[in-house]
Image (cartoon, helix red, strand yellow):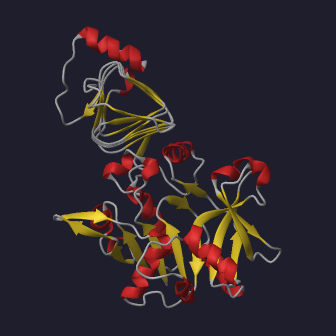
Amino acid sequence: MKAMILAAGKGTRVRPITYTMPKPMMPILQKPVMEFLLELLRQHGFDQIMVNVSHLAEEIESYFRDGQRFGVQIAYSFEGRIVEGTLVGEALGSAGGMKKIQDFYPFFDDTFVVLCGDALIDLDLTAAVKWHKSKGSIATIIMKSVPQEEVSSYGVVVTDEDNRVKAFQEKPKVDEALSTNINTGIYIFEPEVLNYIPSGGEYDIGSQLFPKLVELGAPFYAIPMDFEWVDIGKVPDYWRAIRGVLSGEIKNVQIPGQQVAPGIYTGLNVAVNWDKVDITGPVYIGGMTKIEDGAKIVGPTMIGPNCWICSGATVENSVIFEWSRLGPGARLVDKLVFGRYCVDKTGATIDVQAAALDWLITDARQTPTSQTPLERQAIAELLGTNAN
């Protein structure tokens, strides 16, 4: 069976991570979120998968290649052009991406599934497709019910008593929401739905295709299903996903490595003297990471591979990507460190290189720069860190 993963977006709400990494490649404890989607599709018999790519397309293509090692077949549809020898992404929108593939050669010739490439899900796709076919639907939205107070963060789907879609509300006020069922970005389509999408331009599934189907009275349905759905649309969402896996709230993702103490997991060859560090789980530490004596780590925290946590440093409720070095006395609470960027859980970002904070956070492969004690102390006071 055939499916499509939407992977062409720039991921602007997850910057700075997506400056150098497309959103489908964002790791959930070292495993790209899109890999979990491939596993789910394969489990339910979807083994021919089209992926539309644009922003940092080569990162996705070089990792997943033809899909063979994941037990599926994958092909890619690039959206963009070459400017002075450089690939420039120009995404066509979710529906425009589908139409481009079909215009190239009719790939979608039977019921197919479309998934956004930035969510962790454990949906029973087999049951969803069976329901879709029983309705004679040409398009079905998989919905999830959320608490009333959360509806303003999502696109709300309004259906009649037969689950036929009547209307949409985009992030309505809590007291104006006509439903608590939200659009999860998981869709089941029949090939004829592509007849409603214009060729050669940008076109969106949610804001353009679906309203058109409602207007024309097409057989268009939505079904609420109970399943685990972790949307990684923004930095706080990514933060919650990592915390959820480490704390055990997210059930369908296993913590990698070996458990060396209750709630503490490590990859290969982590350099640490467990008697001289203060570590409280849940914590994951990637392979070939060095934790110096006197460091303190408080979970839920993920520290990627090849990191270096210096003596006296504190890491609490934080996510540290690979090749990060935290200097002596650095204190990171509720932070995400990605390359040269330090991000708090609201998404506010500091460029540590531009701010001359290389003594505090740098690449583990780089010799740290030195600062005078007075400079270090002044900057530390501004950041609320410990420069001693």
Number of labelled discs?
0
The front one of 289 and 268 is 289
- Percent of width and height locating residue 235: 48, 44
The extreme right residue here reads 161
Task: Answer whether residue 67 is visible to the viewer in this image.
Answer: no
Q: Quadrant of the C terminus?
A: top left
44 relative position to 101: left or right? right
- Vertical placement of 75 versus 152: above or below? below
Where is residue 222, by image quadrant? bottom right
Residue under the image location 29 percent in, 61 percent down: 59
Where is residue 200, by image quadrant? bottom left
233 relative position to 100: left or right? right
Task: Answer whether residue 205 is visible to the viewer in this image.
Answer: yes
82 relative position to 77: left or right? left
- Percent of width and height locating residue 288: 27, 40
Residue under the image location 75 percent in, 77 percent down: 164
- Percent of width and height locating residue 364: 23, 35
The extreme top residue here reads 374
- Percent of width and height locating residue 176: 78, 53
- Vertical placement of 137 versus 60: above or below? below
The front one of 133 and 68 is 133
Residue under the image location 72 percent in, 85 percent down: 135
